């Protein structure tokens, strides 16, 4: 997906990055087939690069410093690197290996890192060709993976890089306020009054107090961030949105309250979770509201070419507001 946050670099800079990471003897000199942009992401630019020895790797480059990003996206690459370290240290969940990272800004104007290339299919891309039983099997596997990720030990609520809060209520309300502040600053039309949204969230904030144990939350673990091969999930990608919070905020639970977000039945079965309580249903609606706000506001920050995401997210916000108001 095209976005103003994609920080593309010329071949000579990319070659310099390869040389710094792997040595000058691994830089491919001729031809164009040594590099190709991976176009699925919508925030960082990512390249598949072939080293002279034949190995393929992936290079991710953070947005340029003069492009404004949403508050929660600031320093997102550092968050991803931290999340990858936590996942590899505490779980057996398959993730790419980070070969090299550079935050010096000496070769380009942003952070970047190299990781192993995963030779597999994107689950979202192949999902339409799968049978119902195959989809359910993958969703169950995603549930089990998400539960393992949620078991990573953490000490407080909030962003991986801080600042953290002692309560989930304080951390989540700040997350919502940051998105609303971003939208107000850019004059984004939410099709609802900003203060009306604040009032609705505040009216249901008591449900957040039930969450007393912070957990690692991957949050963006949807099929588009899963690589599959031979009927198995062989890697999960894109960890820059991870935080410490309530596991119920994970993407896999989104379909539990709205069919527009898919069907969470198989995911919940794989996760091994009991049915939701009334307070949990309220929290899930608050999390749906938060996600809809992000999806609306980011369309302005990323200058998308069409209004498809804005329209869809606006409708989901309307539905969620109606459920909370009811």
Image (tube, rainbow, N blue to C red):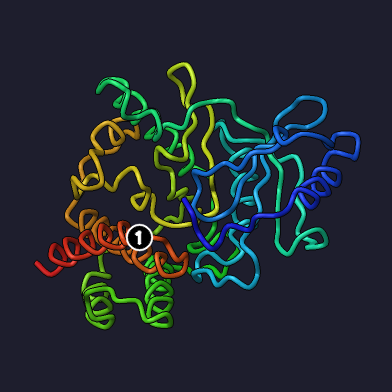
Residue furthest to the front in view is: 31
Q: Position of residue 198 (x, y in %)?
A: 28, 78
Q: Is 234 left or right of 56, judged from the image as shown?
A: left
Q: Position of residue 153 (x, y in %)?
A: 54, 48
At horizontal 31% and vertical 62% (from top left) the residue drawn is: 310
The quarter of the rendered structure image containing the C terminus is bottom left
User: Up-down: is 17 above or below 99?
Assistant: below
User: Up-down: is 164 above or below 130?
Assistant: below
Q: Quadrant of residue 206?
A: bottom left
Q: Position of residue 256 (x, y in %)?
A: 22, 45
At horizontal 82% and vertical 25% (from top left) the residue drawn is: 53
Q: Camera-side residue: 81 or 12?
A: 12
Q: Camera-side residue: 208 or 312?
A: 312
Residue furthest to the left in view is: 326
Q: Quadrant of residue 29?
A: top right
Q: Crowding at label 1, few (<14), some or many (≥20) Cα neighbours within 10 Å?
A: few
Q: Position of residue 165 (x, y in %)?
A: 49, 69
Q: Is 27 left or right of 187, judged from the image as shown?
A: right
Q: Is 42 left or right of 79, judged from the image as shown?
A: left
Residue 268 showing in the rendered view = yes
Q: Which residue is mark 1?
A: 306
Q: Is 61 left or right of 16, judged from the image as shown?
A: left
């Amino acid at each position: 997906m095209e976005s103003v946050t994609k920080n593309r670099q010329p071949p000579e800079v990319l070659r310099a990055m390869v040389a710094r990471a792997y040595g000058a003897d691994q830089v491919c000199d001729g031809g164009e087939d040594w590099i190709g942009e991976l176009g699925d992401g919508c925030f960082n630019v990512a390249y598949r690069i072939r080293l002279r020895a034949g190995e393929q790797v992936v290079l991710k480059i953070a947005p340029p410093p003069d492009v404004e990003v949403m508050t929660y996206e600031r320093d997102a690459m550092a968050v991803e690197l931290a999340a990858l370290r936590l996942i590899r240290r505490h779980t057996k969940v398959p993730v790419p290996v980070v070969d090299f990272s550079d935050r010096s800004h000496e070769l380009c104007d942003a952070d970047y890192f190299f990781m192993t290339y995963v030779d597999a299919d994107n689950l979202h891309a192949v999902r339409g060709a799968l049978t119902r039983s195959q989809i359910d099997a993958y969703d169950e596997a995603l549930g089990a993976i998400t539960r393992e990720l949620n078991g990573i030990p953490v000490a407080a609520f909030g962003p991986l890089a801080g600042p953290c809060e002692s309560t989930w209520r304080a951390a989540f309300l700040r997350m919502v306020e940051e998105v609303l502040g971003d939208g107000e600053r850019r004059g984004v039309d939410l099709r609802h009054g900003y203060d009306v949204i604040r009032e609705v969230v505040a009216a249901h904030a008591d449900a957040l107090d039930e969450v007393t144990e912070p957990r690692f939350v991957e949050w963006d673990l949807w099929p588009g961030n899963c690589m599959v091969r031979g009927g198995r999930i062989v890697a999960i990608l894109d960890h820059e949105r991870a935080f410490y919070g309530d596991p119920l905020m994970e993407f896999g639970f989104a379909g539990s309250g709205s069919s527009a977000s898919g069907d969470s039945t198989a995911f919940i079965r794989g996760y091994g979770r009991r049915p939701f309580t009334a307070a949990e249903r309220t929290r899930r609606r608050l999390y749906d509201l938060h996600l809809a706000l992000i999806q609306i506001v980011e369309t302005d920050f990323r200058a998308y070419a069409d209004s498809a995401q804005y329209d869809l997210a606006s409708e989901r916000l309307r539905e969620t507001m109606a459920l909370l108001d009811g």
